[in-house]
Amino acid sequence: MKNEGLIYRISGPVVTAIDMKAAMYDVVRVGTEGLMGEVIELHGDKAVIQVYEDTSGIRPGEIVVNTGETLSVSLGPGLLTQIYDGIQRPLPTLEKEMGVFLTRGVDADAFDLEKIWTFEPQVSVGDTVVGGQVVGHVQETDTIVHKIMAVPGMGGVVKSIESGDFNVTQTICTFEDGSDMQMMQKWPVRTPRPYQQKYPPVIPLVTGTRILDFLFPLAKGGAAGIPGPFGSGKTVTQQSLAKYSDAQLVVYIGCGERGNEMTEVLDEFPHLIDPNTGKPLMERTVMIANTSNMPVAAREASVYTGITIAEYYRDMGYDVALMADSTSRWAEAMREISSRLEEMPGEEGYPAYLSTRIAEFYERAGRVETLNGEDGSITVIGAVSPPGGDISEPVSQGTLRIVKVFWGLDAGLARQRHFPAINWLNSYSLYPQSLDQWFRDKIAQDFPEVRVELSGLLQIESELQEIVQLVGSDSLPADQQLTLEVARMIREYFLQQNAFHEVDAYCDIDLQYKMAKAILSFQEAAKNAMASGAQLNDVVNVPSRSDLMRGRLNKGYIDIIDDMVKTMCEEIAATVEEN
């Protein structure tokens, strides 16, 4: 047995090699073109390989070379602003070499190995360094300081370290045991990076989207699923989260999405301005583009590549938001490979281990104490694209069993042009109980009660709508008609939000609370006026209510909303005197 073998059988992206020494997950080079692949099964002297590139044209008898390494990603300064494929090949670099059509068997460094970075040590000669400890800083972009860390499991007493200009492969630190370290390190993608402990989810990820922050909040270090049919706004929601959420870094995985949709993302992201810093959003973003026409096995790897990069920045003490769009395409890649391996199919042809793989992915989210004692987090937001919008299918159900936030997109709402098209009756979040104290301390003492009251009004509206469809709204008592009007105000004024409007795209959480209280103030004032003899139509049609609802699209709204609410309540009270 040796490190070279021969192709015995080819079935799409799955190749069987014989007469080769191999271990599970070894990376191999297949055929005369050296296509990249990974050993996924061993049967005696046969190694089953999933190939990350198109296998058309290769033949039995061609050579297979085992590199002896596992599938790993390169980590170091230069990751940010990059656009990679599923196995961390930089697409802009490949385009310069071969144009817009990628040829097979081509490799490229994950980032420029010759680029010079200014390294500033954070430890001194004689200090003891342990795995995961920060030994120095590099200013990677205008907004992000890259912390150079010792590889977990490595360390020793510092023999020499100096500041200066280095590339990522030059030695920056030597230890007394003779080992040294560079700015670049490699990490196997299927192995989670270690940490000291995981914290409970008690800090929200503020997104600036009212329905998400207020009704269905997500914790930093949490996991959320966004299932929804085609055209319901999954990608726009994720892009909005990437731009406006208070995560410090974004890893965006376009996993098996349509080429034109991914092109839009790649075109738009470099031009987006980060509202917090005024710098390009790409300065704190890593993108992984693996479109539906790219090799299916690389799609399976892209999710692991993305989460490993996210863990690396988490270990520096950053809050990272990871967007996976979409995990359904990832699961389809697993299904295709599983069928080529002739494994026993599970539900709808997916492999029996589908739920386990989904769980392993989402479990790598979390807010943790890192090995160097800092707090960092990865928040995972996975889009699911169930066929026909049917969330009873295995990927949606496997996701819902793991995540604690479900933002259910509704095609009906999307057709009505209600965006974000998140169905407030089907969606849920299991985090409010642990986040309520944060909202009480930072925003307002009655924040949780206001949320419950708004949710209750929407629930009552749903029940009343069934009666309205039978007998019409005019047959309802005045107080129930008012409830319908208040619920309509919640939907149109509060829940609807224009992701492309320069003001309305992001709503500060303090303003969200004020808007919610404005709705309840309207309800209270209207009830009091109607109890004193005012007519519902007069109450509903006071001019200042329309001004209040339209005002949210204007800058400086947070400064005048209290006065607008006061004027509205005065006008409603005046309707009693008129009657």
Image: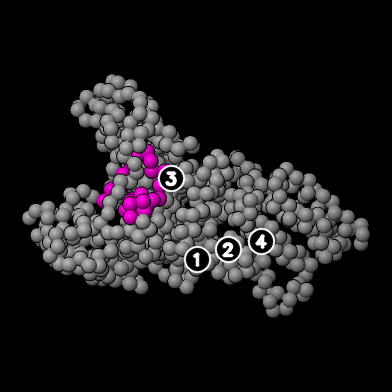
Residue at the (35%, 26%) spot, across then down: 164
Residue at the (58%, 63%) spot, across then down: 421
Circle nearer the viewer, 4 or 3: 3
**The N terminus sits in image quarter:** bottom left
Q: Say if mark 1 contacts mark 2, CB within 8 Å.
A: yes
Residue indicated by mark 4: 491
Q: Please say whether residue 367 is visible from this viewpoint.
A: no
Q: Say if mark 1 contacts mark 3, CB within 8 Å.
A: no
First in sequence, mark 1 or 3: give its number: 3
Residue type beneath disc 3: Thr
Magenta residue check for 77: yes
Residue indicated by mark 3: 81
Q: In which quarter of the image is residue 475?
A: bottom right
Residue indicated by mark 1: 228
Q: Distance between the residues labelled 1 and 2?
A: 9 Å
Magenta residue span: 71-98
Q: Please say whether residue 111 is visible from this viewpoint.
A: yes
Q: Distance between the residues labelled 4 and 2?
A: 11 Å
First in sequence, mark 4 or 1: give its number: 1
